Image (spheres, helix red, strand yellow):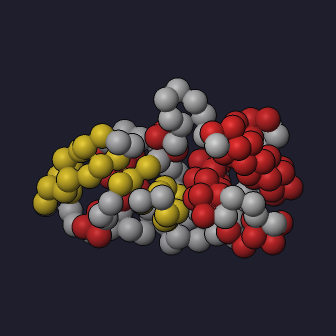
């Protein structure tokens, strides 16, 4: 067992764990952050997606010993009491059905929009290809991402 210093959702945490324990289980079991879900355990479904320094990663296969940087989970995506544009668009477009995959979907979409603020359908499909939705809400997911991109561009124009 070792102690690891993590910055999660802007707050420091000291976690004592086995070095090979996946980040997902540290988040869920040690820090009680239940948004990232266990789906497959082999980084194929995206339900466990979180950000490390803004990059979407599959937390189910990332050992805690290899985590460096700021971790953001779905619980930390909203800022100053305001939902992230992707979260707002998800609600507006009524994306979730069962909801199990949605935190991972949202985290992947937010990371993609951070680097590609005006994605095409192909860009979205490519960026989201590692996230599976058993309910098949892909059309609504794509529409919500386009709406979030538009909202972000309008917000950016307002700030200029």
Residue 149, x across and y down, in percent: 74, 51
130 or 79: nearer the viewer: 79
Tell me if residue 74 comes above or below residue 145 in the rendering.
Answer: above
Q: Residue furthest top?
A: 81
Quarter placement of the N terminus: bottom left
Quarter-wise, where is residue 29 in the image? top left
Q: Is residue 116 visible?
A: yes
Residue 65 lies, in percent from the top left, at: 25, 67
Q: How many marks overall?
A: 0
The residue furthest front is 160
Quadrant of residue 9 in the image?
A: top left
> Would you say residue 155 is visible in this rendering?
no
At 42% from the left edge and 60% from the top edge, which residue is drawn? 52
| Quarter location, residue 131 | bottom right
Seen from the viewer's position, the closer of residues 97 and 121 is 121
Residue at far left of view: 2
At a point 82% along the width and 40% down the height, the residue shown is: 93
* Left or right of residue 56: residue 88: right
Residue nearest the viewer, comparing 128 with 111: 111
Residue 17 drawn at (x, y percent): 20, 56
- Residue drawn 41% across the image and 59% down it: 53
Q: Position of residue 58 (x, y in %)?
A: 49, 65
Please name the residue shown 19% across and 47% down the image. Answer: 14
Up-down relation of residue 46 to residue 100 (above or below): below
- Quadrant where the C terminus sits is top right
Indicate left or right for 113 with 74 as reference: right
């Amino acid at each position: 067992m070792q102690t690891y210093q993590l910055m999660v959702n802007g707050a420091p945490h000291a976690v004592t764990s086995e070095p090979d324990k996946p980040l997902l289980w540290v988040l869920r079991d040690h820090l009680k952050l239940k948004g990232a879900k266990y789906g497959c355990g082999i980084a194929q479904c995206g339900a466990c997606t979180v950000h490390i320094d803004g990059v979407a990663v599959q937390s189910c296969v990332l050992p805690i010993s290899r985590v460096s940087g700021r971790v953001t989970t779905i619980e930390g995506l909203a800022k100053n009491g305001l939902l992230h544009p992707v979260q707002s668009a998800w609600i507006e477009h009524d994306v979730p059905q069962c909801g199990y995959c949605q935190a991972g979907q949202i985290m992947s979409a937010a990371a993609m929009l951070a680097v590609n603020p005006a994605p095409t359908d192909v860009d979205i499909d490519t960026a989201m290809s590692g996230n599976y939705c058993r309910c098949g809400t892909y059309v609504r997911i794509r529409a919500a991402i386009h709406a979030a991109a538009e909202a972000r561009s309008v917000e950016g124009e307002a700030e200029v």
